Image: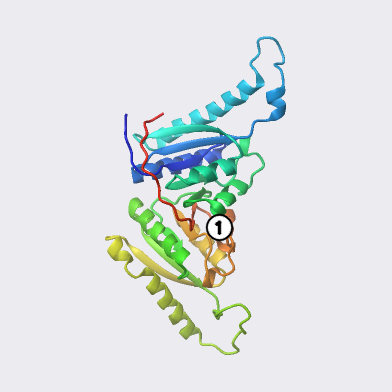
Amino acid sequence: MATVTGAPVVVGVDGSPSSLDAVELAATEAGLRHLRLHIVHAFVWPASLVAARPAREGAPEPATVVRTQADTIVAEAKTHAEKAAAGIVITTEVASGPPSFVLLERSRHATLVVVGDRGLGRFDGILAGSVATHLATYGSTPVVVVRGSEKQGGPVVVGVDGSARSARALEFAAGEASLRGAELIAVHVWRTPALAGPGDAMPLVYDLDLLEAQEDRRLSTALDGLGDRYPGLRVHRELGRGSAGPVLTSWSRRAQLMVVGDRGRGGFAALLLGSVSQYLIFHSACPVAVVRDAARAPATLSSSAG
């Protein structure tokens, strides 16, 4: 009987290769954080199967077959997690309901939620899509969408734009880099020139060197105090010009994890789940963490391995 404190790392599974990749990353995260891993498989009961009768006498009820398949998916995921991070506490759950809804509910009591970028089986038909995007848009905790490949030894890269949401993403990224023993690269992407607000006229003349110096100061301000909070953390600063999505995607080709806020301002202007967060969910070459702006107080949980 092992006891752990702190909200768990939750991972959604559906039996697809993508979800097993998510299990591996989630198990690693749980091990690094000394937290419980909670594996969730959610599905909607197919009414036609539940109402059907067995095809022949003595055959199992269709509903039993569906439940057995769900249990098999969870058992396989647990075995995969045990191999990825031996010794962690693991619990499992088979839930009835749409995966997006179930995982959104579980995110209210999680430290982190991890999902694959696409699925098969009971997530059939989803491309980087509804589950990952719904969680990144409405979840109550940071969401990691597993896509591409982790570059072992690569940096953790975070998009910084000076907004409050970006500051939370930076804090999350610094914590991840510290846990992983990785370098943190803070990337600030800016356009020329930066307009103060909607409807502002584009200046006819501007000084690129002056604008770059201003954006450099913005990045420096965002990073103030980070070294004090994370002693020993290696931090590298980068300025980029252009569209934030493509610039950050280029960094993802050498990163083990990309981190962004769910929306921002400045270089990340006009975001809802914004263009940057969504762009990376679809195009990043490595896993992407989207740090949500949802206030909550994680409960202290105790659990034994299931």
- Display colour scheme: rainbow
Would you say 270 lies left or right of 32 here?
right
- x and y percentages locating residue 263 in the rendered image: 53, 63
Task: Identify the image quadrant of residue 44.
Answer: top right
Residue farthest bottom in this picture: 205
- x and y percentages locating residue 187 in the rendered image: 45, 67
Amino acid found under the numbered disc labelled 1: Leu
Q: Is disc 1 placed on a helix, strand or loop?
A: helix
Q: Which residue is drawn at 57% across and 90% down?
A: 205
Q: Is residue 283 above or below residue 26?
A: below
Quadrant location, the N terminus: top left
- Residue matched to label 1: 280
Quadrant location, the C terminus: top left
Number of marks in the rendered image: 1
Q: Is residue 227 above or below residue 218?
A: above
Would you say 299 lies left or right of 56 here?
left
Q: Which residue is drawn at 49% across and 60% down?
A: 260
Task: Identify the image quadrant of residue 243.
Answer: bottom right
Residue farthest top in this picture: 57
Would you say 2 lies left or right of 280 here?
left
Q: Residue at x 51, y 63 (%)?
A: 248
Q: Is residue 186 above or below residue 147?
A: below
The residue lying toward the viewer, choosing from 4 and 115, is 4
- x and y percentages locating residue 71 in the rendered image: 53, 27
Crowd tier of the residue under label 1, counting other residues whose Cα lies within 10 Å: few below 14, some 14–19, many 20 or above: many
Q: In this view, does 90 lie above or below 194?
A: above
Task: Identify the image quadrant of residue 49.
Answer: top right
